[in-house]
Image (spheres, rainbow, N blue to C red):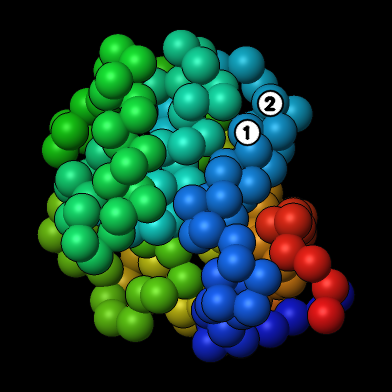
Amino acid sequence: MKSISVAEARQIDQDAVNLFRMPSILLMENASRAVAEAARRMGDQFIILCGPGNNGGDGLAAARHLGRAAEVYLLKEPDPQAAPDAHLQLEILRAAGHPVHLGELPRDRSAVWIDALLGTGLDRPVRGRAADWIAAFNAGSGPKLAVDIPSGLNGDTGEVLGIACRAERTITFAAAKHGLLAPAAREYVGEVEVAGLGIPEH
């Protein structure tokens, strides 16, 4: 399987926006549809753990596609300046009346657990509340799906940065990241599925 670095993945996103005039929110929408489709193949009830960045935005948008079968837990509100697309996804959910549990550790129940916490940009050990949420994910009853990369893994090396989510399937975008294919990451990523983002070939 072909893989790319985290920097190359960012460049693909930037090219989509700058060269092809694709709004970044469209990329998030395409990613979220792929997440929802993968989740439905694993079950019919969902617990989505979302962080405050774009990885969390993918999870928030996926919740819209999954409907009221999705229970959403948000670690921290997205900053409208730093993560405007994720912030917009949260506003859409709230406008639709979809419950969002803010800062509340997820309660265990049998469901598909979806990790949309930290994404590929992580470069330091996970500590504090984020570590608690990863531990809750790992202890959850039901199959586990990671969005782009299991939270807690270094996207380039596959190194566990303190603690990491253990997924049965990881859905990643555009191409697999180097870290997903590293031997050290094998027990965390499970089956790797690559989803396109609708970016034109060039």
Compared with residue 45, is residue 37 higher up or lower down, i.e. above or below? Answer: below
In the rendered view, tell whether residue 139 sits above or below residue 168: above
Residue 40's quadrant in the figure? Answer: top right
Instruction: Residue at 47% x, 28% y: name it.
Output: 63
Q: Residue at x 83, y 80 (%)?
A: 202
* Residue bearing mark 2: 40
Find residue 195 and report its horizontal and vertical position in percent: 74, 55
Query: Can you see residue 191?
Result: yes
Q: Which residue is mark 1?
A: 36
What residue lies at 48% left-to-right and 26% top-to-bottom? 64
Three-letter amino acid code at the position of disc 1:
Ala
CA distance for labels 2 and 1:
6 Å
Q: Quadrant of the N terminus?
A: bottom right
- Say which element carries label 2: helix
Comparing 130 with 8, the one in front is 8
- Pinpoint residue 152: horizontal percent, then vertical percent: 40, 66
**Residue 201 occupies which quadrant of the picture?**
bottom right
Residue 183 can be seen in this image: no
Are dots 2 and 1 in contact, CB under 8 Å? yes
Task: Tell me if mark 1 has few (under 14), some (14-19) or many (20+) residues whose alpha carbon lies within 10 angstroms of its own.
Answer: many
Circle 2 or circle 1, nearest the eye: 1
